[in-house]
Image (tube, rainbow, N blue to C red):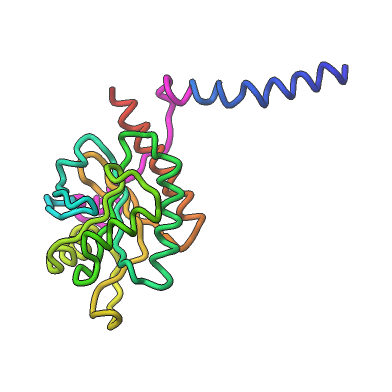
């Protein structure tokens, strides 16, 4: 009897994840959908927040626009390469998310420098190289400071902090999840590991939303 029980438990452990995976992939069971940030149920606004067209240059020296994210969901953030504390932790935690989804072609990443005077293409290339990321999946971008700041404050709704070192600039520790329609689906604290795990879960939820629409 004990032997049968052990075999049963082992079978559950081995087969359980497979069954769950098949149910996730092929079923349309109910699950909590993420709201559109800025929608009526979130803030009372009548129009959800939308990320407008943009044009920046990434660590490869290539132009990066909204078209590069068509058909994909993505995670965005704002940083600067010489940041001594918040940014390194933010991008280390974001790198954990990247590792989990690096083989998922429908998930991408974009990090905007808020200190373009210093963060040249070469600096961004070296920064990305240290993280050992796929340069076509995770873009580190620079551009006109005015455009970066406008996008951060007005479109991504990133919580900005003004500072004076190394220049007067905005700074955010938030990670922003954007869907295929360019709507914000979640904003996460990059310094809180539980919130980073919530981001991973929410990416899976949004991917399933699109899978179930097929």
Q: Residue at x 88, y 16 (%)?
A: 1
Question: Measured from the top left, where is residue 167 in percent x and y?
Answer: 24, 80
Query: Relative to 161, is 26 above or below?
Result: above
Magenta residues span: 23-49
Q: Residue at x 45, y 41 (%)?
A: 100
Asked if the magenta segment contains residue 46, the reply would be yes
Outermost residue on the bottom side: it is 164
Which corner quadrant of the image does residue 141 belong to? bottom left
For the residue pair 146 and 57, the one nearer the viewer reads as 57
For the residue pair 43 and 75, the one nearer the viewer reads as 75
Q: Residue at x 13, y 51 (%)?
A: 52
Q: Main secondary structure of the magenta part?
A: loop
Number of on-image labels? 0
Question: Measured from the top left, where is residue 37 in percent x and y?
Answer: 28, 52
Q: Quadrant of the image for the C terminus?
A: top left
User: From this viewpoint, is residue 46 visible?
Assistant: no
Question: Measured from the top left, where is residue 2 in percent x and y?
Answer: 87, 20
């Amino acid at each position: 009897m004990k032997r049968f029980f052990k075999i049963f438990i082992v079978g559950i452990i081995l087969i359980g994840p497979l069954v769950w995976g098949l149910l996730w992939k092929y079923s349309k069971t109910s699950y909590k959908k993420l709201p559109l940030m800025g929608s009526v149920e979130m803030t009372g606004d009548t129009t959800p927040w939308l990320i407008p067209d943009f044009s920046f240059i990434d660590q490869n020296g290539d132009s990066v626009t909204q078209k590069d994210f068509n058909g994909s969901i993505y995670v965005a953030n704002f940083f600067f390469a010489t940041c001594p504390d918040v940014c390194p932790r933010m991008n280390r935690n974001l790198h954990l998310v990247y590792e989990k989804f690096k083989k998922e072609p429908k998930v991408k990443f974009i990090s905007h420098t808020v200190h373009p005077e210093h963060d040249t293409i070469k600096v961004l290339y070296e920064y990305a190289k240290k993280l050992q990321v796929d340069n076509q999946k995770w873009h580190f971008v620079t551009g006109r400071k005015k455009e970066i700041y406008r996008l951060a404050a007005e479109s991504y709704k990133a919580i900005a902090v003004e500072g004076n070192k190394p220049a007067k600039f905005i700074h955010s520790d938030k990670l922003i999840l954007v869907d295929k329609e360019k709507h914000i689906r979640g904003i996460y604290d990059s310094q809180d590991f539980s919130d980073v795990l919530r981001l991973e879960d929410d990416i899976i939820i949004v991917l399933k939303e699109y899978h179930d629409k097929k």
